[in-house]
Amino acid sequence: MRNLKELVRQHWDDEPCGTRGIPYPIGSLAYFETIAERRYRLNPHIAEYAQFDRWESKKVLEVGCGVGSDLLRFAQAGAIVTGIDLSERSVMLAKERFHLYKYDGTILQGDAEDMDFEDGTFDLAYSMGVLHHTPDIQKAIKEIYRVTKAGGEICVMLYHQPSLVALQMWLAFGLLKGKPFRSVDDIFATEHESLGTKAYTVDEARRMFSAFRDLRIDTVVTAYDLRYGRDRYLPMWMIRTVPHGFGWNLMVRGVKP
């Protein structure tokens, strides 16, 4: 079996995050605009946590920038941006996007577990839905700590359990497959996105990020918790009817001492 990280890279090379089903030529303005529209319609909380406008003239690192949706918004708000991604194809598309929109940014293929930056480089280390895919998440968190300035901030999203998405996955790949005792961890690792994907509890996240101070961990209900089929979602207003503790996104903010 090939190295797990290589399998993760291949998965996101085959289908960069957010690009499934986009009906426009790859790399076109309509292609990128549709990716962004869908991302922020289904994930309106991203802007609340990223706080794009706060980072004007500050150095921002996005760990796992994908095709550059959030990185571009930081750049448009005046941040000095750097993005890394394990996927070569994602990096290529992100570079094309920045060129198309005429913004500057440093975008590199790189590994969250072994970043090629000096200690204390960035004012913000940002990672939205990425670290749960890397085989050694604790190593990646240590790297994020290392490259963040003293007094700098982190904003990280991880997948959460228990959540309605976790329940959906268990129903589809556990109960309905005649395997009611199959663990949610095993289902995520083998059935959801890239091989080895994980989801974490609030307590697990608190332990993993314990080196940071002023730690704030929130759970956020998303459109994916309301999904009832591929690209089929219940109305967004129904998010308000679901207790936050069952949300799919685990949002971690903190400050490096």
Image: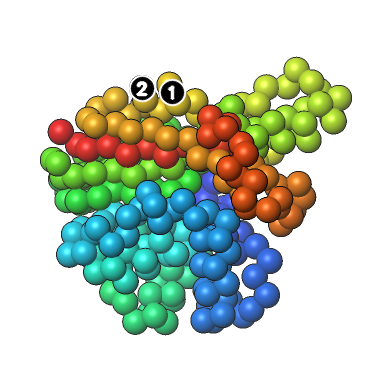
As drawn, is 201 to the left or to the right of 55?
Answer: right
Residue 187 in which image quadrant: top right
As drawn, is 114 to the left or to the right of 4?
Answer: left
Q: Residue at x 24, y 44 (%)?
A: 153
As drawn, is 143 to the left or to the right of 72?
Answer: left
Q: Quadrant of the N terminus?
A: top right
For disc 2, the marked residue is 207
Q: Give the distance between the C-alpha atoms of the residues marked 1 and 2, in whole angstroms.
A: 5 Å
User: In this picture, is 211 found above or below 101?
Assistant: above
Q: Are marks 1 and 2 in contact (CB under 8 Å)?
A: yes
Q: Is residue 87 visible?
A: no
Q: Residue at x 37, y 37 (%)?
A: 252
Q: Quadrant of the C terminus?
A: top left
Label 1: which secondary element? helix
Q: Is residue 125 visible?
A: yes
**Place of residue 71 in the rendered image (x, y in percent of width and height, measured from the top left):** 37, 62
**Place of residue 6 in the rendered image (x, y in percent of width and height, measured from the top left):** 52, 46
Q: Which mark is residue 186?
A: none
Q: Nearer the viewer, residue 224 or 234?
A: 234
Label 2: which secondary element? helix
Q: Nearer the viewer, residue 46 or 4?
A: 46
Q: Amino acid at mark 2?
A: Arg
**Place of residue 202 in the rendered image (x, y in percent of width and height, measured from the top left):** 45, 26
As drawn, is 149 to the left or to the right of 6?
Answer: left
Q: Residue at x 69, y 38 (%)?
A: 191
For disc 1, the marked residue is 204
Q: Amino acid at mark 1?
A: Glu
Q: Residue at x 51, y 61 (%)?
A: 40
